[in-house]
Amino acid sequence: MLSHLWLHEPDAETIARAVVELGLPLADPSTTLRASPADLASAYTDVFLLNVYPYGTAFTDPSGELNGPEAQRVAALYEVHGYRPPELKSVGAPDHLGLCLGFLAAGQDGLLPRIAGWAPVCCLAVEREPSAHSFYRALASTPDNTCL
């Protein structure tokens, strides 16, 4: 579930599961209006495509560029363990937090030391992003993300 939410704009079914399973809010505290799937799709774009890039190298590479040597080492680790999710071809780099969480959920903890240094910072950046919807702020503060 966490991996999917970091990788995709949510549809109505995913939103319902996230509310029940993770306790994510549908309404911002500043309003009583519940977010629709379209609202959260727009919010996803705003936070993950425009403001906080959920890639390890965005946080660890001195230049902030994606697909650097560390990202390629992550890709090699995926290959060794046969981890080939379809999203690997559609995201900007293999060190996307959603892919990393999926790898961990598949029972592979070899990536944990690599992401422990940047994933909590990425989550904190989402939590502090002024334009982030409360749904995504809550996603970023989910214990499974922040305890990396």
Image: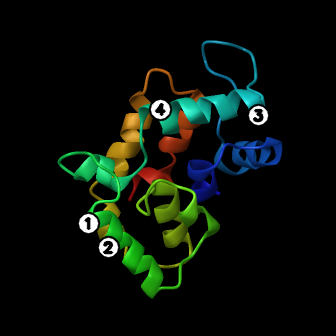
Q: Amino acid at mark 3?
A: Pro
Instruction: Please name the residue shown 60% across and 62% down the image.
Output: 87
Label ID, residue 50: 4
Callout 4: few (<14), some (14-19), or many (20+) C-alpha neighbours within 10 Å? Answer: few
Name the secondary structure under disc 3: helix
Q: Considering only vertical position in the picture, is 60 above or below 130?
A: below
The residue carrying mark 2 is 73
Q: Considering only vertical position in the picture, is 1 above or below 37?
A: below
Name the secondary structure under disc 1: helix
Name the secondary structure under disc 2: helix
Name the secondary structure under disc 4: helix
Between the residue at mark 3 and the residue at mark 2, the CA separation in whole angstroms equals 35 Å
x and y, in percent, of residue 10 in the image: 71, 43
Q: Which numbered disc, 1 or 3, marks the residue that appears first in the sequence?
A: 3
Instruction: Please name the residue shown 70% across and 47% down the image.
Output: 18
Between the residue at mark 4 and the residue at mark 1, the CA separation in whole angstroms equals 24 Å
Between the residue at mark 2 and the residue at mark 4, the CA separation in whole angstroms equals 26 Å
Label ID, residue 15: none
Instruction: Please name the residue shown 77% across and 43% down the image.
Output: 11
Q: Which numbered disc, 2 or 4, marks the residue that appears first in the sequence?
A: 4
Q: Which numbered disc, 4 or 1, marks the residue that appears first in the sequence?
A: 4
The residue carrying mark 1 is 69
x and y, in percent, of residue 103 in the image: 51, 71
Q: Which of the 4 image quarters holds residue 80?
A: bottom left
Q: Considering only vertical position in the picture, is 134 above or below 144?
A: above
Callout 1: few (<14), some (14-19), or many (20+) C-alpha neighbours within 10 Å? Answer: few
Confirm or deny contact between disc 2 and disc 1 (CB under 8 A).
Answer: yes
Between the residue at mark 1 and the residue at mark 3, the CA separation in whole angstroms equals 36 Å
The residue carrying mark 3 is 37
Q: Amino acid at mark 1?
A: Pro
